[in-house]
Amino acid sequence: MKPVYVLNGPNLNLLGLREPAIYGTATLADVEALCKSHAEALGLGLVFRQSNSEGELVGWIHEAREKASGIAINAGAYTHTSVALHDALKAADLPAVEVHLSNVHKREAFRHTSLIAPAVTGVICGFGPQSYVLALSALHSFITANKKG
Ligand code: DHK
């Protein structure tokens, strides 16, 4: 089976240092280790990446279109602004989960709108690093049931 791509957007490289009251104290390396062990338990291969560049994220989604069985994406602030990520996810045509550490609906109004939500299978937010674990489990069920959602 092709691996699952877990893609992280802008400022997530600062996880653990950045607004810990909102995003927690786990670093992105901690989140990656959590994802790796959960993916292994599920029998899924994992590609885990972070970029501050919208174009690089678009390129990785294009790559996933050929090389991945599903995508979990925390697009950071691009969630709320990026038509390019929306279009790339539509083009990828894979099971995909929008992930957030924080519950964006409890926060500023500008975070209540996601431009990528209409292009993915489902959305998980508010569970800290566990949001990623839940996303991987959801992708695993969809991929093994051969569904796109
Ligand atoms: C991360 C970000 O960087 C914000 O721009 C999003 C998301 C929320 C998160 O909770 O993981 O609004």
Image (cartoon, rainbow, N blue to C red):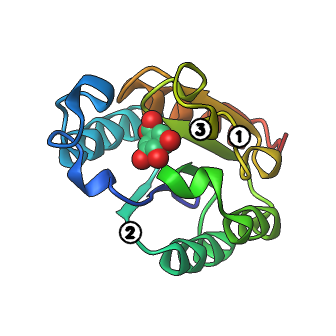
Q: Residue at left 49%, top 79%?
A: 56
Closer-to-camera residue (138/122): 122
Residue 33 in the image: state x and y as whole percent: 23, 42
- Please name the residue that numbered disc 1 is placed on: 113
Closer-to-camera residue (113/61): 113
Question: Regarding mark 2 in the picture, which secondary structure is present there?
Answer: loop
Describe residue 136's horizontal placement relative to residue 37 as left or right. Answer: right
Q: Residue at left 51%, top 53%?
A: 77
Question: Regarding mark 3 in the picture, which secondary structure is present there?
Answer: helix
Q: Residue at left 35%, top 30%?
A: 129
Q: Residue at left 46%, top 28%?
A: 131
Circle 1/circle 3 CB separation < 8 Å:
yes
- Please name the residue that numbered disc 3 is placed on: 111
Residue 103 in the image: state x and y as whole percent: 51, 23
The answer to which of marks 3 and 2 sits earlier in the sequence is 2
Residue 92 in the image: state x and y as whole percent: 75, 67
The amino acid marked with disc number 1 is Thr
Q: Quadrant of the N terminus?
A: bottom right
Quarter location, residue 143: top right
Task: Characterize the local packing of mark 1: few (<14), some (14-19) or many (20 or more) Cα atoms within 10 angstroms.
Answer: few
**Relative to residue 77, is residue 41 depicted above or below?**
above
Quarter location, residue 38: top left
User: In front: mark 2 or mark 1?
Assistant: 1
The amino acid marked with disc number 3 is Arg
